[in-house]
Amino acid sequence: MFDAIPHIGIDPQSGSDPAEDYVQSLEYLSQKPVSFVFPGHGPVFNSLGIRTEEILRLLEARQRQILSVLEEGLKGAYEITCALPWRIDGTESAYAELPPRERRAGVCEVAAWLKRLCSSGRIAALEMNGKTVYLAK
């Protein structure tokens, strides 16, 4: 589990802000007095607080990457997705090199983070020529 980062994405079954929901759940869990974690995959471990902090740092880093892409100017979700680095099975890849399923998951992940960044006031969504584009504030 320590080498896996859970996927966050928007899909028809997700709530209104899945990234925020996930962050809140991590913050909630990090406060619990847990002695051991028995994940569905990977070895048992005893450092839930450390793991949740690590995941929260990685999630904030992903948001900073998205903001960095938006510093270049207006971009749509797909353009942002294509500009980001992706890591699959420990190997960094360009978006175009990912398998189709991973590409779809990537767009869904970026959409979730764009929603979170809009809700937090860090970016703005604009409608231009029938397309939603995003602007860093």
Image (cartoon, rainbow, N blue to C red):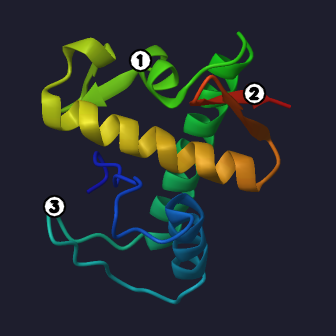
Instruction: Indicate whether 101 appears above or below 128.
Output: below
Query: Which SS class for mark 2?
Result: strand
Q: In this view, does 95 lie to the left or right of 34?
A: left
- Kindly report the distance in space between the C-alpha atoms of the residues bearing marks 1 and 3: 30 Å
Q: Can residue 59 be seen in this view?
A: yes
Q: In this view, does 39 lie to the left or right of 125?
A: left
Query: Which SS class for mark 1?
Result: helix
Question: Residue flagged by tag 3: what amino acid is it?
Answer: Gly
Instruction: Indicate whether 9 appears above or below 86.
Output: below
The residue indicated by pointer 1 is: 82
Residue under the image location 62 percent in, 22 percent down: 129
Q: In this view, does 129 lie to the left or right of 58?
A: right
Question: Residue flagged by tag 1: what amino acid is it?
Answer: Cys
Q: Position of residue 55 (x, y in %)?
A: 49, 53
Pointers 2 and 1 in contact (C-beta within 8 Å): no
> Which circle marks residue 135 in the picture?
2
Work out whether mark 2 precedes mark 3 in sequence or the reverse, and give the earlier one.
3
Please identify, in this view, whether the residue under mark 2 or under mark 1 is nearer the observer: 2
Q: Position of residue 92 (x, y in %)?
A: 30, 19
Specify few, some or many for label 3: CA neighbours under 10 Å numbering under 14, 14-19, or 20 or more: few
Q: In which quarter of the image is the C terminus?
A: top right
